[in-house]
Image: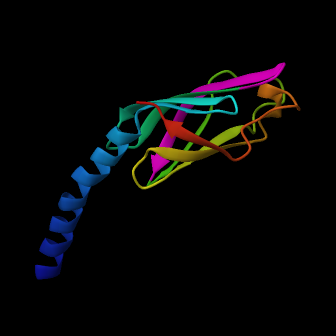
Amino acid sequence: MKKNRILAFTLLAASPYALAQYANMEGSYSAPIGVSLQVIVLDSQKGDVAATTTVVQGACSGTVAGLGKVAGRKMTFTPFTKEENGDACVITVEFDKSFKRARIKGDACMVYSGAACGWEGATITKEK
């Protein structure tokens, strides 16, 4: 019985922290190399987000916008609108502890940006 109370208290105490983390994630991020990300937290309890990322590098550009999930400091989302042969595209964003910087990468997303540019490991910083 005592273990159950401790477990329940621990879960309740951790929940506000997780909710505050997700609120800190919301906003716009960018990198000097032409990569940007906008995040809106839809449901902080479930970790539901809407996100858009754009890459512009010279004449090459692309955009992926969709719904996704956050677990810890990792967010993944897939495109709303599927391009032909674009079903496997997943954008992954791994945030630092303060949610002020992140690394973004696209897996199987070339159909959304072209071969000359992409989201491969770009470091983005939260805009003020």
- Residue at 82% over, 28% down: 111
The residue that appears at 60% across and 29% down in the rendered structure is 36
Residue plotted at (32% across, 44% down): 45
Residue 114 at x, y = what percent?
Answer: 85, 27
Q: Is residue 23 above or below residue 38?
A: below
Quadrant in which the C terminus appears: top left
Describe residue 13's horizontal placement relative to residue 39 as left or right. Answer: left
* Residue lying at 83% horizontally and 24% vertically, measured from the top left: 84
> Residue 61 in the image: x percent, y percent?
77, 22
Q: In the image, 8: left or right of 31? A: left
* 86 magenta-colored: no
Instruction: Using the image as rendered, state which of residue 101 and residue 83 is in the foreground.
Output: 101
Q: Is residue 113 visible?
A: yes
Left or right of 128, for residue 122: right
x and y percentages locating residue 42 in the rendered image: 38, 31
Q: Count the numbered circles shown.
A: 0
In this picture, which residue range is highlighted in magenta?
Answer: 56-71
Q: Main secondary structure of the magenta part?
A: strand
Report the residue that reaches farthest toward the right: 115
Residue 18 spot, x, y in % from top left: 31, 52
Task: Examine the image and state in which quarter residue 20 appears.
Answer: top left
Q: Is residue 90 above or below residue 67?
A: below
* Residue furthest to the front: 32
- In the rendered image of this protein, does residue 12 appear above or below residue 117? below
Q: Is residue 1 visible?
A: no
Residue 2 figure quarter: bottom left
Q: Is residue 61 magenta?
A: yes
| Location of the N terminus (image quadrant) | bottom left
Model colouring: rainbow
